[in-house]
Image: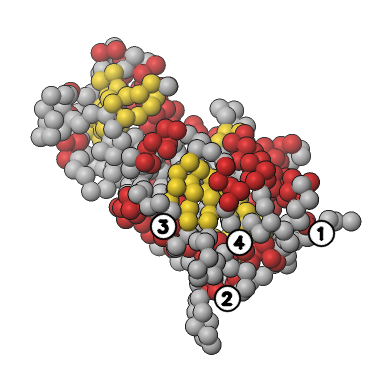
């Protein structure tokens, strides 16, 4: 017989942020009914603990504080805490200003320990996932965070896991351990899974503008989780279970990986046919159905596309059911920076000089425009491969002063003599590899570079231009 705490609520229709035509109450009032996290006037302010203050957790903590909740942000990395306290994060514009406003706030607390979990009314688990160099999932940080949550759980608490992870994680890491402690999920504590939907550096996809998928263990769990997620989303799409919501996140990232791999393949095909892949993609995107534009680049970085699908692949392999299309797509995606380095090598060889006598500048260090986040950035691998050949490599990114490559920190340079006449100028580089362009900055100096390898397929500049 299935234990009561594992019974899942039935699938319901999508829930969107609308006003009740009769009462004028918001979605979050309607969804939550009487089980609200916000306490009665005169009582202590509702407290939310956010575990993991990375690209998803930090914006979530800020949004929850803005909604009037007392927030305790828990981050295990002292270096990351130092960056946050000093305002040196990847947040830009309005979010950076909101962080500065939160830092002196006594109800926005930063901590490196789990002690505050016992006092929290709700816990949002935003621990980033990772894989090793063989593509094997590393769940150590997530397991440690969930174990701490279970250890400090108390009656009435709402626990929502948001980290992309393998299907069954919410049940294995939260529901079952809580039951072993005698806490009935759905009655004593309330558990759900809702994957984050954050696109760093893209204002159009800011967290509050995105609907979120929510899979809860029971009806009561859904009610409590929906109330917690109110400040983080325009609305919710409910699925039948936490496992279904976990699978949704892996499907989303796998979808992007497959289509990005296809974009790389089509870019190569276009170059073979002497065609512009951006022109071709833009034209295909005019089709009003059945096509979603993905564009070629130097590779895929960040926290999702190149990481999340491995959590699905690993689980399927253990069951003897490989997902061959996704596996091949990931091979293509992860091979892209090496492909760029190989193409750069071909262009450098044309000089007839030794590699040790050549200097290259990589333009763009962050994994995407509009961000300073260098997580899994293709620029780091491209630089590493060229350094291994003896090439002198510099990098330039106006948002990234230092880039870590092979465990060593490399300082960025400014090759524009109008801003810095003390270093190497554009003409001093045998090749400029354009990995990414930060919006709002002047790259006119690229026109003076002898050769430009354009991985964006959009920067027609330099004395001689080449594509990957």
The residue positioned 25% from the left and 13% from the top of the image is: 357
First in sequence: mark 3 vs mark 2 = 2
Around disc 1, counting alpha carbons within 10 Å, would you say few (fewer than 14), some (14 to 19), or many (20 or more)?
few
Around disc 2, counting alpha carbons within 10 Å, would you say few (fewer than 14), some (14 to 19), or many (20 or more)?
some
Q: Position of residue 61 (x, y in %)?
A: 46, 52
Q: Position of residue 7 (x, y in %)?
A: 78, 60
Label 1 vs label 3: CA separation? 37 Å
Front: mark 1 or 3: 1
Side (left or right) of 423 relative to 129? left
Q: Relative to 447, does residue 278 appear above or below in the rendering? A: below
Q: Position of residue 270 (x, y in %)?
A: 40, 43
**CB atoms at circles 1 and 3 under 8 Å apart?**
no
The residue positioned 51% from the left and 43% from the top of the image is: 74
Q: Position of residue 125 (x, y in %)?
A: 57, 48
Label 2 vs label 1: CA separation? 26 Å
Q: Quadrant of the C terminus?
A: top left
- Identify residue for label 1: 4
First in sequence: mark 4 vs mark 3 = 3
């Amino acid at each position: 017989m299935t234990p009561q705490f594992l019974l899942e609520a039935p699938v319901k229709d999508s829930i969107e942020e609308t006003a009740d035509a009769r009462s004028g109450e918001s979605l979050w009032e309607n969804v939550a009914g009487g089980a609200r996290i916000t306490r009665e006037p005169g009582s202590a302010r509702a407290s939310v603990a956010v575990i993991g203050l990375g690209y998803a957790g930090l914006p979530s903590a800020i949004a929850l504080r803005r909604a009037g909740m007392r927030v305790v942000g828990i981050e295990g990395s002292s270096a990351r805490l130092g960056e946050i306290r000093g305002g040196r994060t990847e947040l830009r514009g309005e979010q950076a200003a909101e962080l500065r406003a939160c830092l002196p706030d006594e109800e926005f607390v930063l901590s490196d320990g789990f002690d505050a979990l016992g006092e929290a009314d709700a816990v949002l688990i935003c621990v980033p996932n990772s894989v090793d160099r063989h593509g094997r999932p590393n769940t150590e940080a997530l397991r440690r965070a969930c174990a701490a949550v279970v250890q400090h759980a108390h009656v009435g608490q709402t626990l929502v896991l948001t980290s992309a992870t393998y299907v069954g994680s919410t049940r294995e890491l939260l529901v079952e351990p809580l039951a072993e402690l005698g806490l009935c999920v759905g009655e004593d504590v309330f558990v759900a899974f809702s994957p984050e939907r954050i696109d760093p550096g893209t204002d159009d996809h800011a967290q509050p503008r995105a609907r979120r998928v929510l899979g809860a263990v029971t009806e009561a769990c859904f009610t409590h989780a929906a109330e917690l997620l109110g400040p983080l989303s325009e609305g919710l799409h409910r699925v039948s279970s936490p496992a279904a919501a976990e699978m949704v996140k892996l499907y989303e990232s796998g979808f992007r990986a497959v289509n990005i791999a296809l974009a790389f393949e089509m870019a190569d095909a276009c170059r073979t046919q002497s065609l512009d892949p951006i022109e071709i993609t833009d034209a295909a995107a005019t089709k009003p159905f059945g096509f979603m534009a993905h564009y070629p680049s130097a590779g895929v970085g960040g926290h999702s596309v190149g990481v999340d699908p491995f959590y699905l692949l690993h689980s399927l392999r253990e069951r003897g059911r490989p997902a061959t299309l996704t596996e091949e797509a990931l091979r293509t995606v992860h091979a892209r920076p090496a492909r760029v380095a190989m193409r750069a090598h071909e262009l450098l060889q044309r000089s007839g000089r030794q590699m040790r006598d050549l200097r290259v500048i990589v333009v763009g260090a962050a994994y995407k425009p509009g961000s300073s986040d260098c997580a899994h950035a293709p620029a780091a691998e491209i630089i590493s491969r060229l350094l291994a050949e003896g090439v002198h490599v510099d990098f330039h990114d106006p948002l990234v002063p230092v880039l870590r490559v092979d465990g060593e920190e490399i300082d960025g340079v400014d090759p524009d003599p109008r801003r810095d006449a003390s270093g190497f100028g554009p003409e001093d580089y045998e090749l400029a590899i354009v990995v990414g362009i930060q919006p709002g900055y002047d790259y006119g100096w690229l026109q003076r570079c002898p050769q430009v390898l354009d991985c964006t397929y959009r920067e027609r500049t330099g004395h001689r231009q080449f594509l990957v």
